[in-house]
């Protein structure tokens, strides 16, 4: 059954739970657009139209989405296998795909505990796929918006021990948070809640990579399609999210340049800055 079939059949996901956004297939959404760019099937006509328009404006958009997913894998593998992290708070999870955070972390360290957070009804409908953990570790899912850090931290404490290091994952989500919601404060609140030895892994659309003309066009497409209004930020602005943290090598770079796999080129033109940093 396709996503459209499920909606037509009266899937109960179209009811609102609390202030969770309703299941509106006529409005494009970042998680479903990302799914489409990754070759997934959990997207709708509005998502595909918005994604195709964005790809036309910036032809590197599909490469960017796939490079971001590859960065997730490399970052989690580094954190679990090299940095010794056993707890992950993955906010802005998106629709499950191959190589989810718990799969990578638990392959390297079976006792890893992972909490996923998202605020999209389609992601919630697929949350079961994110809760398949091995016997040693644990996974949980929280239906919450990034802006609601209190709910996230309170519910994550059911699975994570905040007296021990946690990796906070914020991949390709902060550009959906406008300046009015003070994204720097949100990140600082999350990092204040975790102890020294914790990490922040982050990727963010770069205004200085897209350029003013492309950035304006993408924002215009967003307004026309009704999906989230993005706030693209420069490398210097993205660097501010890491204030007070120690960036690990190679620092703040494009996603394809962060510890690429041997034999993988880094010449592709993606639109995301990324970094991983340790809380001292």
Image (cartoon, rainbow, N blue to C red):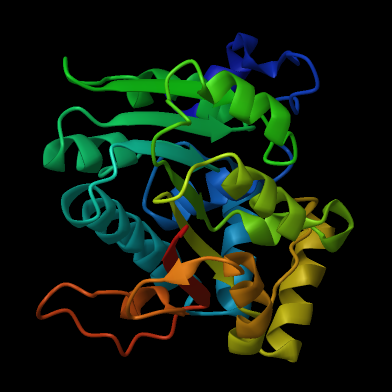
Q: Nearer the viewer, residue 24 or 107?
A: 107
Q: Residue at x 69, y 75 (%)?
A: 233
Q: Position of residue 5 (x, y in %)?
A: 52, 22
The x, y position of residue 207, in whole percent, is 67, 81
Give the vertical position of 2 relative to 17 (above or below).
Answer: below
Quadrant of the rendered image containing residue 247: bottom left
Q: Looking at the image, how many numbered discs can be counted on the residues? A: 0
Q: Quadrant of the C terminus?
A: bottom left
Nearest to the observer: residue 60 or residue 259? 259
Can residue 94 be seen from the camera position used here?
Answer: no
Among all residues in the image, which is located at the extreme right? 180
Residue at the (45%, 31%) spot, across then down: 163
| Left or right: where 156 falls relative to 137 | right
Query: Along the horizontal axis of the image, is 176 left or right of 216?
Result: left
Instruction: Give me the residue at 29% from left, 44% from top.
Output: 85
Query: Who's the residue at 42% across and 41% down the image?
Result: 166
Asked which quadrant contains residue 174, the reply is: bottom right
Position of 276 relative to 106 (above/below):
below
Q: Is residue 233 visible?
A: yes
Residue 78 quadrant = bottom left
Q: Quadrant of the N terminus?
A: top left
User: Quick one: which residue is furthest to the left in this view?
Assistant: 263
Q: Position of residue 56 (x, y in %)?
A: 58, 76
- Residue 248 image offset from top left, x and y in percent: 36, 72
In the figure, 101 relative to 70: above or below? above
Q: Nearer the viewer, residue 61 or 143?
A: 143
């Amino acid at each position: 059954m396709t996503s459209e079939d499920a909606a037509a059949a009266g899937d109960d996901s179209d009811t609102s739970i609390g202030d969770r956004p309703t299941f509106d297939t006529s409005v494009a959404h970042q998680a479903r657009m990302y799914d489409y760019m990754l070759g997934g099937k959990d997207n709708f006509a509005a998502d595909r139209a918005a994604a195709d328009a964005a790809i036309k404006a910036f032809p590197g958009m599909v490469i960017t989405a796939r490079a971001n997913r590859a960065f997730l894998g490399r970052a989690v593998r580094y954190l679990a296998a090299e940095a010794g992290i056993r707890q992950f708070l993955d906010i802005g999870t998106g629709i499950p795909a191959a190589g989810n955070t718990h799969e990578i972390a638990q392959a390297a360290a079976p006792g890893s505990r992972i909490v996923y957070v998202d605020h999209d009804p389609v992601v919630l409908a697929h949350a079961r796929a994110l809760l398949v953990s091995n016997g040693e570790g644990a996974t949980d899912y929280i239906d919450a918006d990034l802006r609601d850090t209190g709910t996230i931290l309170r519910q994550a404490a059911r699975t994570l021990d905040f007296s021990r290091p946690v990796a906070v994952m914020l991949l390709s989500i902060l550009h959906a948070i406008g300046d009015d919601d003070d994204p720097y404060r949100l990140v600082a609140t999350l990092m204040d809640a975790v102890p020294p030895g914790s990490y922040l892994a982050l990727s963010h659309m770069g205004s200085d990579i897209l350029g003013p003309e492309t950035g304006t066009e993408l924002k215009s497409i967003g307004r026309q399609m009704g999906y989230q209004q993005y706030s693209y930020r420069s490398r210097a602005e993205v660097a501010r999210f890491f204030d007070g943290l120690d960036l690990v090598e190679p620092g703040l770079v494009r996603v394809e340049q962060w510890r690429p796999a041997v034999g993988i080129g880094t010449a592709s033109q993606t639109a995301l800055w990324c970094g991983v940093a340790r809380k001292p």
